[in-house]
Amino acid sequence: MQSYTIGQAARLLGVSPDTARRWADAGRVATHRDEGGRRLIDGRDLAAFSVEIAQGGGAAEGDVPYTSARNAFPGIVTAVKLGDVAAQVEIQAGPHRLVSLLTREAVEELGLEVGVEATARVKSTSVHIDRA
């Protein structure tokens, strides 16, 4: 399973590294240390925490910056539903939840699973997923 540094997690959550560090210090998201002593967050834990924040259980007013996201939404995969031919992938990109329908083959080739960093790209009514 992929793990993320505090800085990477902050970028995916749409907050400052200081905010992500305070949340980790407060025990709101579990961390562990790598061989170099850096604090890391397990991808599945970060995915669950990003959903909690987006549903109003996390960020205080002003913690999430308001920006023009344009058409690229870097985030973390929070759900993957595989069918025989098609798949549904959900990404939490800061306060934005994006859902894309794509082929099962594409999901498998990209290695998309809960906790993996990915970018949703929006053009017109289609959402395309890039693996980070």
Image (cartoon, rainbow, N blue to C red):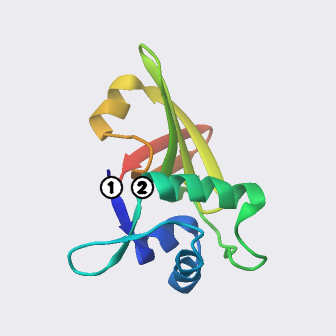
Q: Count residues near mark 2 (Cα–Cα under 10 Å), then give few for <14, some for 14-19, many for 20+.
A: many
Label 2 sits on residue: 43
The structure residue drawn at horizontal position 54% and vertical position 77%, both measured from the top left corner, is: 20
Which of the image's four quarters has the C terminus? bottom left
Q: Name the residue type under label 1.
A: Gln
Checking the image for residue 85, the label placed there is: none
Outermost residue to the left: 35
Image height of 35 relative to 44, above or below: below
11 or 125, which is in the foreground? Answer: 11
The picture quadrant where one finds residue 126 is top right
Outermost residue to the bottom: 18
Q: Secondary structure at mark 1?
A: loop
Q: Count residues near mark 1 (Cα–Cα under 10 Å), then give few for <14, some for 14-19, many for 20+.
A: few
Residue 8 at what x, y percent from top left?
Answer: 42, 71
Q: Secondary structure at mark 2?
A: helix
In the displayed structure, does residue 124 sit left or right of residue 38? right
The structure residue drawn at horizontal position 37% and vertical position 40%, both measured from the top left corner, is: 112
In the displayed structure, does residue 112 sit left or right of residue 29? left
Please tell me which of labels 2 and 1 falls first in the chain.
1
Q: Name the residue type under label 2.
A: Gly
Residue 118 visible: no
Residue 60 visible: yes
In the displayed structure, does residue 3 sit left or right of residue 21? left
The structure residue drawn at horizontal position 60% and vertical position 46%, both measured from the top left corner, is: 98
124 or 58, which is in the foreground? Answer: 58
Residue 122 at what x, y percent from top left?
Answer: 55, 47
Q: Are marks 2 and 1 in contact (CB under 8 Å)?
A: yes
Label 1 sits on residue: 2
Q: Give the distance between the C-alpha atoms of the residues marked 2 and 1, in whole angstroms.
A: 5 Å
Residue 24 at what x, y percent from top left?
Answer: 53, 75
